[in-house]
């Protein structure tokens, strides 16, 4: 049974999450965000459900810790918050959050998101070291409707053979796009395939790409 770590200072919220998810998940919860990292290291959860606004501690800081610390960066973080602002959601996405759910929680949607993400996982991140680095790229190809597109974007993290970035067009999994480094030389980096999508319900979904042709020039070469 997969394990969840729930971090929320409201006991009622933690109890509601347990009641709704305990049939499918082992739930470890805490109302003390100061203990969250230690609990994550101890229990090694398959996913983290995190509130943003808690006394004496910022959920944003805790999120950044989880997504950047080598021992926890592979654990997907889902935010559960009473904040509905688009800027907050975008900021969380930039921190590496894979899902954002407003209170009161739609547990059917949360369960579906958990099942989908944990089924697909982040397997491509385990084989190589990833670096949180912003690299400007130009993507070109066809969107999910078959329409051609070209756009500029910036990576959020990279490895020797893959990268994660936002993309303002809808792409299907396994879609192959051309990748060009943005700069005076306009070097062609190669072609990459979509292996995972995140935040596809937002105007700027994120996609994990894996190179299908060995890049002639890449940042980590």
Image (spheres, helix red, strand yellow):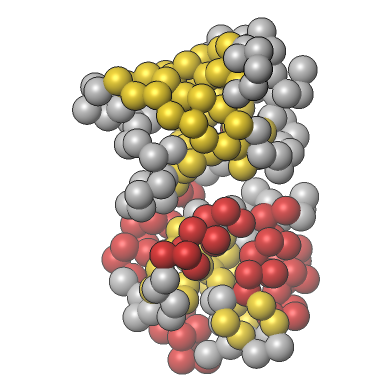
Q: Nearer the viewer, residue 183 or 56?
A: 183
Residue drawn at 63 percent across, 70 percent down: 60
Residue 162 visible from this viewpoint:
yes
75 on left or right of 114: right
- Residue 76: tell me if it is visible: no
Q: Quadrant of residue 92?
A: bottom right
Q: Quadrant of the C terminus?
A: top right
Name the image quarter holding residue 40.
bottom right
Q: Quadrant of residue 8?
A: bottom right
Decide: is 220 above or below 17.
Answer: above
Q: State how many labels appear.
A: 0
Of the pair 214 and 154, the residue shown nearer to us: 154
Taking the image as shown, residue 159 lies to the left or right of residue 4, namely right
Image location (x, y in percent) of residue 212: 53, 14
Where 178 falls versus 35 (above or below)?
above
Up the image or down, 84 lies above or below 195; here it is below
Residue at x-position 36% and y-position 52%: 202
Could you tell me residue 95's position as x and y percent?
A: 61, 56
Residue 148 % position (x, y): 30, 20
Residue drawn at (52%, 29%) of the image: 209
Q: Residue furthest left?
A: 145
Q: Nearer the viewer, residue 180 or 92?
A: 180
x and y, in percent, of residue 131 in the image? 73, 38
* Residue at image point 70% right, 74% down: 36
């Amino acid at each position: 049974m997969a394990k969840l770590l729930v971090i929320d200072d409201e006991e009622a919220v933690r109890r509601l999450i347990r009641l709704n998810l305990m049939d499918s998940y082992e739930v470890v919860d805490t109302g003390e965000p100061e203990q969250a990292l230690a609990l994550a290291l101890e229990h090694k959860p398959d996913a983290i459900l995190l509130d943003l606004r808690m006394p004496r501690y910022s959920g944003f800081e805790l999120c950044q810790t989880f997504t950047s610390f080598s021992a926890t960066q592979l654990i997907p973080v889902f935010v559960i918050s009473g904040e509905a602002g688009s800027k907050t959601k975008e900021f969380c996405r930039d921190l590496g959050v894979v899902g954002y759910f407003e209170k009161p929680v739609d547990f059917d949607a949360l369960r579906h998101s958990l099942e989908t993400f944990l089924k697909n996982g982040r397997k491509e991140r385990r084989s190589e070291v990833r670096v949180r680095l912003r690299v400007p790229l130009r993507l070109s190809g066809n969107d999910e409707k078959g329409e051609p597109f070209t756009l500029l974007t910036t990576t959020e993290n990279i490895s020797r053979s893959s990268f994660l970035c936002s993309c303002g067009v809808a792409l299907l999994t396994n879609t192959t796009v051309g990748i060009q480094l943005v700069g005076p030389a306009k070097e062609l980096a190669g072609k990459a395939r979509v292996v995972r999508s995140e935040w596809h319900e937002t105007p700027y979904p994120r996609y994990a790409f894996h190179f299908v042709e060995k890049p002639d020039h890449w940042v980590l070469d």
